[in-house]
Image: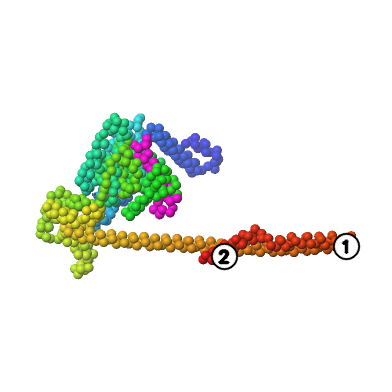
Amino acid sequence: MDALKSLVQPLVGGMASSSMVDGMKLVVLGGTVETARRVSSSAWSHFVNSFFLTASFSDEDMPYEWLMLWLSRRPEWQRSREFETTTRTTTVGLSARTNGGTELEDDEPDDPEDELTPGKQKLKVVFQPTFDSTHTIYYKGHWLRVRRTKKNDGVEVLSISVVARSNSVLKQLVLEAKKDYEAEAIHRVQIYFADSHGSWRWTDSRHKRPMSSIVLNPGVKEVLLNDARDFLRSEKWYADRGIPFRRGYLLHGVPGSGKTSLIHALAGELMLDIYVVSLSASWINDSTLTTLMGRVPARCILLLEDLDAAFTRSVTRDAGSTGAPTANNKDAANGTSSSNRSNSNDQGNQLSDTNTLSLSGLLNSLDGVAAAEGRILFATTNHLERLDPALSRPGRLDVWVEFKNASKWQAELLFRNFFPSAESEEMVLTPEEVQAIEAGLSSPPSPVQSSSSLSGMSESDTAFAPPPPTLEHAIQAPLTASRLAELAKKFAESIPNEEFSVAALQGYLLKNKTRPEAAAFEAAEWVISEREMRERLKREKEERDRKERLDRERRRREILEREEKERVEKEAKERDRLREVLEEERKERKDKAKADKEKEAQDKSDAASREKENAEPEATESTTETTSEPSETTDTQSTPAESVADGWEKASAGDSKET
Ligand SMILES: Nc1ncnc2c1ncn2[C@@H]1O[C@H](COP(=O)(O)OP(=O)(O)OP(=O)(O)O)[C@@H](O)[C@H]1O
């Protein structure tokens, strides 16, 4: 301190007061402390950078999902002192869990009213650590530093750092998280969609659909399932014979017949993920498709939706559309590039010309060198007639399955699947419920009644409320197996063979989901009303088409008339212009002739005067006779402009005669 004083003393001289010295001391001390803090902090980050191994995971990739699920189960993650709250719709399944909030969400008991307001989306509050906060988690003898950050483009990144000599602990962690995730995903099918950059993006995870819920004519499901299973077991068989290990299925037929549903059910059964490309996407082209095909994993289902779009580039799924090849799709079918698609502006239903997918590009992507092996390809189309036979070559689409409208057999089975029977396990009623049904009592208080009493409505007010639900609506007594069979038969009898899609029948049953009896007995009526509606829609469509045709015709006529009028006006203008030119020429000629005559006269008089002077009168007379002739002929000759104008006049005279 004395040293500091002796340093300061000469600066402030004898005037230095003790308070000033104290102030200086404080400054020096503060500076020292701050410098020490900075040095230690930079030393720490240097230490971290040199000894910590760091792995980063972007939320655009699956490992992020695995790790978020893993973290959500760690108590350290849940005990975060800085957390954010967010709401999300409650979705049963992984996507909800992987937000890292399953264990952290509010513990509020489910509101019984939610049960009574079907369709209402339930929001829950999720607590999760804030971005940019660091958490320390102990894992297999190592301290992990976990940090979640958000980049400017909105992409979330999870960084995990660990002090270790090798990165094996991080690898172990990722593998463990993956295993946990897969254990969780065993009952779900992961869906990936292609993006315009040629990458696959995980999009959804759906509950597996039981094969039994797919209603197809006998044998179809079994054949497909066995074939796919057999294929997956036969890698060596293919390798031994040098055959590319690929198998393709084409599901074609009417919309709403179960093509997509069957693929989902098969994926669940075979424990495969689904990779979907929609060929009607505007950005799809040869090179993106080839890149995508090369990037599918070895064991998966690759689903090409709307295969016909690759041939026609048509986005319409209108049943009335014939699918007749257009100039463009002929090119495509010939295997030539469809880059000349820019001519297609006149085709209302054609995609933009940025779409350059060709048949050869599609075929190459299916079985070219870059195509992945081991995948099962499924392609769907509603328009088989638009496809090229080249697709049926082995290794491309080996098995073709047609999907038709529902047969009577399918209608019956669909009905049976839809309604529970007393023997089925799904519907287990409590003894009270059974008692209530037997006693013919109404179900528990209806939502309308309870809400009206809550809002203070008087007894008489209930007259304005909708009627309370009947027993039939509230609790559906399970049917006995024999009654269910009877009703299913009755339903199938009322449904005409292969006239309605399974989706349409499902829609009808859904409307009657609590009324199996009514569903069976009113089916014939529904068929009639559906037919009438179809007829009406058909008539309306025809009327619309007719109007559009007339409109088009009228517009075409108007355009033709306008063009004709413009042509006539143009010709008249041209005639006028030529006439003016002609007039000017005539005038010029006259002026010229006049000037010539005057000049001639002048010359003559000059010559006469000269002759007079020379006294030779005979020579002057003969010169006058010969020079007067050319001026007469000039008048009678027509110039080129005159002849063109004459032509125009003659032509227009002819035109006017014709009209
Ligand atoms: N054969 C079927 N068995 C069970 N459900 C079916 C069947 N066909 C259709 N459905 C039901 O109808 C709806 C539409 O079916 P899906 O999407 O599988 O038909 P699709 O043939 O793929 O139609 P699109 O060609 O229009 O894509 C789904 O809800 C599905 O459950």
On screen, residue 460 versus residue 132, left or right, reads: left
Question: Is residue 584 located in the magenta-colored stretch of the structure?
Answer: no
What label does residue 612 carry, if any? 1
At 32% from the left edge and 39% from the top edge, which residue is drawn?
393
- In this picture, is 320 found above or below 12? below
Which residue in the protein does label 2 denote? 653
Amino acid under disc 2: Ala
Q: Count residues near mark 1 (Cα–Cα under 10 Å), then give few for <14, some for 14-19, many for 20+.
A: few
Q: SS class of the residue under badge 1? A: helix
Residues marked 1 and 2 touching at CB (< 8 Å): no
Q: Quadrant of residue 72?
A: top left
Q: Count residues near mark 2 (Cα–Cα under 10 Å), then give few for <14, some for 14-19, many for 20+.
A: few
Residue 2 is situated, as x and y percent measured from the top left of the image, at 48, 35
At 29% from the left edge and 32% from the top edge, which residue is drawn?
238
Q: SS class of the residue under badge 2? A: helix
Q: In this figure, which colouring scheme has been used for the structure?
A: rainbow
Residue 190 is situated, as x and y percent measured from the top left of the image, at 29, 43
Residue projecting furthest to the bottom: 460
